[in-house]
Amino acid sequence: MKNKKIVVIGFVGTQLDSGKGSARWEKWRPSVALTQHEDMVIDRFELLCNRGYEGLVRQVIEDMGAVSPETQVVSHTLALDDPWDFEQVYSALFDFARDYPFDPEREEYWVHITTGTHVVQICMFLMTEANYFPGRLLQTSPPRRHAPGAPGSFALIDLDLSKYDQIAQRFSHEQQEGVAFLKSGIATRNPRFNAMIDEIERVAIKSRAPMLLMGPTGAGKSFLARRLYELKKARRQLDGRFVEINCATLHGDGAASTLFGHVKGAFTGAASERAGLLRSAGKGLLFLDEIGELGLDEQAMLLKAIEEKRFLPVGADHEVHSDFQLIAGTNRDLAQEVARGRFRDDLFARINLWTYELPGLAERREDIEPNIDYLLRAFGAEHGQMVRFNKEARDRYMRFAMSAQARWSGNFRDLSASVTRMATLAEAGRITGEIVDAEALRLARLWQPAVAGPADGLQAGDGDVVDLDALLGEAAAAQLDRFDALQLQAVVRVCRASKSLSEAGRSLFAVSREAKRQPNDADRLKKYLARFGLAWDALHA
């Protein structure tokens, strides 16, 4: 393939490129010197200048033509009155880049940053970094020793940091540390959750747009929002506070006052001014949990505050300003809420750019064990005593935690409370089988309404009580551990509420079946029942 043409884009240096008479050839002039290198040919030089220096530009073009007649020089006078004004310079360069016919397939662009004011050089760098100039930075230097007419040296700087191994490794390491921070160092094993956290970390560092965290109560939305705040604060992207409110606690006229503040005398009882949470979160992060509970009026006010960073406190005549980043949480399907007229579609569109659904604990059962280890470490750090399971107790608790009987309807809140209870009751830092059995029984009772509810096709009073003595015989039932008895009762309830063996199997093995290429739920259930001498037909007789 034919080599690309080399095109230089640079400002004429009103001081460095100037000179009169033959003496100018004894002076190092960066723009002219670029065309004097014998081993490098510049095909075209796009020479930029501000108004009033057209004479200097003509002289520079003439001298370039004398030393490098093969170089085409094109001059561009920019609408620039003050080359030290950042806004003017950046706007002029932006307009130039927008209209310039770049052709990266055939041309290679070098952006010369040796000449021009410091503001010009900074703006040229920023334009190249943002790829408005699709090229590399070019830095030139005079000869080290006085050598009249010598071209000096030049160096190209590539801003694609991924090409620099050590820098790329540092960025990769920093990204991995950020992901680990968001997960609190918990070695999660759920591929979907890990991929989601990877993306959330990248978005959090690069974007200030609102983020929406969806998921059931207890899935960790509030915890993740706080970790995101701490990550961004550590990277110096936020200076303000972390402010959190559950919108379900906001009611009536007090909702707007809590969020947006009020002025003194705005309503009966407003004896003094109130800043409100949006102002308190200025330069920080505002987490609005259960945002779907907000009233429509507050939703409209919030939309304006997100888009314009301005809003009216209750009773005020003048708007106030607050630049905060928003993370919203919800356990509702906001798209359905929009369809029902309970949530504004324009607000939903505004906060729906980065939306992530946090799976509940029942959908991440492989993460139960690493979370137990994390919770035990946290308990030990807080109380100054390491707590551990003995092997039998750990195995027993994990069997229960991974079983269909363990609903985890409160998600990580249930797990945290369960581990805390067992660790508190542990003698000499040891969680025993007896403690596990008692905790399994407590959780089973806690979830009993969910086990016997409509989710499993059970109606109230419809086979809720499973008499194992009658089903297995008193002697056989007495030989069962409490754990096995509770699990068997839950399985029998599902079987009695299901129309077929396959339907019951799908319900009981809904999570683990996904990991199997050819799941045979009916066969698994049939073998489980056979361990207790039970058959499907007998359960429905």
Image (tube, helix red, strand yellow):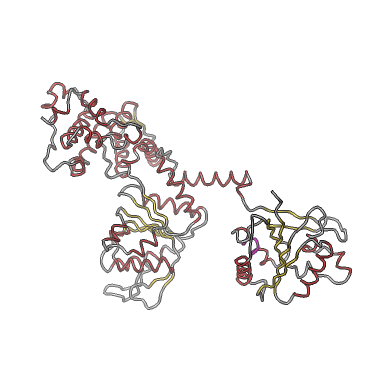
- Percent position of residue 540, x then y: 12, 31
Query: Which image quadrant is residue 42 in?
Result: bottom right
Report whether 262 appears left or right of 497: right
Query: Which image quadrant is residue 81 in?
Result: bottom right
183 or 192: nearer the eye? 192
Range of the magenta residues?
Answer: 122-127
Task: Count all numbered tags in the image, as a single digit.
Answer: 0
Residue 37 visible, this orientation: yes
Report whether 151 appears left or right of 315: right
Secondary structure mostly taken by the magenta-highlighted segment of the chain: helix
Which residue does the image show at 29% across and 42% down from the upper left? 414
- Percent position of residue 373, x then y: 39, 36
- Percent position of residue 534, x then y: 17, 25
Assess whether residue 124 is covered by the magenta stretch: yes
204 or 133: nearer the eye? 133
Which residue does the image show at 42% across and 46% down from the upper left? 196
316 or 457: nearer the eye? 457
Query: Which image quadrant is residue 430 in?
Result: top left
- Percent position of residue 539, x then y: 14, 30
Please identify the residue farthest to the bottom as the structure is shown.
Answer: 317
Report whether 422 appears left or right of 109: left
Report whether 168 appears left or right of 269: right
Assess whether residue 234 is covered by the magenta stretch: no
